[in-house]
Image (cartoon, grey):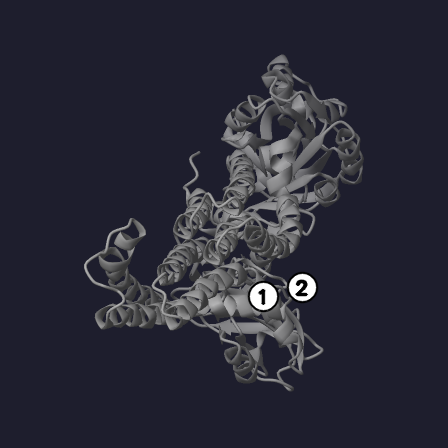
Amino acid sequence: MTQSAQNRQEDFFHVSGMHCSNCERFLENEAAKISGVHYAEASYAADMVRLKYDPAQVTKDQINEVFTRTGYELKSDDSDNRREEDDKNTVARLIIGGLFTMMAMTYYILFLYPTYFGSSGFMDLNASEGYFALANIFVMASFVLFYTGYPILRGGYVSLKVRTPNMDLLVALAAAGAYTYSIGALLAGFTDVYFDVTMTLVMVVSVGNWYENKIKKRASSQLRELTREQVETARRIDDDKARMVPVGELDAGDRLLVRPGERIPIDGTIVDGRASIDESLISGESLPVIKSRGDRIIGGALVTDHALTIEVGPEAENTLDRLVHLIWDIQTSRPGAQKLADRLARFFVPAVLVLSGGTFLIGLLVGWTFTNALLTALTVLIVSCPCALGLATPLALAAGIREALKNQIVIKNASVFEEAPELDYIVFDKTGTLTTGEMRLIKADVNQEVLYRARAVEEYASHPVARAIAAGELPSNYKVDQVENHLRGIQARVNNDSTFVGEPEWVANFGFNYPEQWRKMATEAYQEGHIPVAVAWRSQIRGILIVGDRPRHEQKALLEQLKNTGKELVMLTGDSERATLPFKRDGLLQKIYSRVKPEEKEGYIAELKKNGKVAMIGDGSNDAPALARADIGIAFGPTALAADSADLVILDNDLSRVPMAFQIARLTNQRIKQNLGWAFLYNIIAIPLAAAGMINPLFAALAMASSSLLVVINSSRSMKF
């Protein structure tokens, strides 16, 4: 939950009663009528609605009252108990409706179906016992239609309210049509009643909807969990006293007290205390990490043991809130394939209604009986329900997002699902991406005197190479003065000896003897992409220290895997050509550009895009322009969530997640296309057969349900990597 300076509060509500995509527009339209609600966006895939409203004008209870009158219920939380209660109500509808359907079908099997084949059955339906049986069937069919089928009837009503006819309207018309015809036949003294069509249709669709909702809730569980854990208040320290304030009122620099067992309300830095932090909800890291003064800390993480005082970060942001919004944006987005399906569905339902009516009239004109013409028209309605079409993308997207989150991947832009399978180039930053980004002393084949003098001098330098050398033990008997920093090194007096530490050539220029063994070591270091540092005093270079940015342990396997896919691999780095030598020797990168400034990387990406689709992988900071220019921008680490330029974020900083992200996107894209292809193929085949009278209503109901079930099963399949 967030609150702006304009007193607009934003909340994510869980919605009970959503069962089709038209519910999104209906809820948004109803919310727009409420005074004080400024913005509403609903998501059928997540069973949630996002509202921005003025709490001074309208309360949560008042908003919920409006939605309750239309058959929905808003919940600020989505506890397991309440979700189980909703599931129990749905299952109760199915069980009771199923029992009545089985009882009614027993009557049909014993008394009605035999008459269809010229037999008299077990009872004379013209006798009083027969009418009693038909009356029982009527009562049971009424119960199934109006109790078990209530969500379907309401869905049809909602579709009319938003002027977007949907599958619920078709099912409702077909079920109610068969029911109404049967009542008329019963009152007229006929025994040709079709309550079985009504009950079968309602039960098949209801069971399908129930199973679909189970899959949908499982797929959207991550978003539900995150919104449930959002922090609304914080304990701010004012004048040495802690008081609770809304998170929306926090500013950069505020100090907050977080007690054990509480979630950190906002991103910041620890200024007092040391505690074990559980970040599993945000980063997926299963083990708590110890953090203390000076460490950055992310909003949404859980403090497990000791109290902390944290200072709100400069942008007063919350990583958990950011993650909630990212997942919401992707689940409510519409890839290109679904946009096409949405446009077709808008015209599809009215076309089916016209086709059904036309079939009825043409049937009468060509000599069909009224009953046959009506049943054929009803069959057209039943078989053409575009349920599979509506489910094709939302369920596949929800499953893809869930699979990505399980693997520490946040997909921020729906275009990833369409662009990833079409990539031609994958461009890497070097430092912090293919390497760890941390300078370390990786070789020190020198005596302790050389190492200690280097550490003593480098403590006065701020270069990353200097920090790598200075990190370590240093005896207290080394006294340093007269320090002079230079571009390529540093000099100082150490225990009265003039000591130089820096690039070997720079040190040698001061007249120091440069032995061959140290020259050879420096040359080998350059060839490996490392940095040699010479240490000299008393006219002699006494040793060479090797500092380097270590390659990630997984980078070679990653490059080999990506190269085998046929994509061209490129490196853009600001480092010198020497630093790229190890990568050139491996031969895994087809192109390597060195000494590229951050602002120049965007131009290289733009040039590559002229020849194909490009993915850029960087650390989310100085690579931002290049990430934004690429077709897919990939950033690393939890803090990279703030990188608006990235389309995809690897939360745990693991480079091996990249091919997995591409594979998830590819598989999700395949499933969307498979679902849409099946949905269109089914309708192309089934509707003409139904219009020709070659399919009866019962078969049509089963075929329609099977079509939807295939889409649900295909979307919910586990992804094999």
Height in image: 684 above or below 250? above
Mark 2 and 1 residues: CB-CB less than 8 Å, in contact? no
Does the image show residue 229?
A: no
Q: Is residue 446 above or below residue 389?
A: above
Q: Which mark is residue 581?
A: none
Asked if residue 102 is positioned above or below residue 483 in the image, the reply reads below
Instruction: Specify few, some or many for label 1: CA neighbours under 10 Å numbering under 14, 14-19, or 20 or more.
Output: many
Task: Say which quarter of the image contains residue 596.
Answer: top right
Percent of width and height locating residue 159: 58, 65
- The residue most toward the top is 516
Q: Which residue is disc 1 drawn over? A: 159
Residue 289 at x, y percent in the picture: 43, 54
From the top left corner, tell me how far across and down residue 251 is, in percent.
66, 72
| Residue positioned 59% across, 31% down in the render | 548
Residue 93: x and y, percent? 34, 68
Quadrant containing the C terminus in the rendered view: top left
- What amino acid type is highlighted by mark number 2? Pro
309 vs 355, nearest the viewer? 355
User: How many labels sit on residues?
Assistant: 2
Of the pair 567 and 237, the residue shown nearer to us? 567
What numbered label is drawn on residue 314?
2
Mark 2 secondary-structure assignment: loop
Position of residue 701 in the picture relative to residue 349 (left or right): left
Label 1 sits on what residue type?
Ser
How far apart are labels 2 and 1 at the CA level? 47 Å
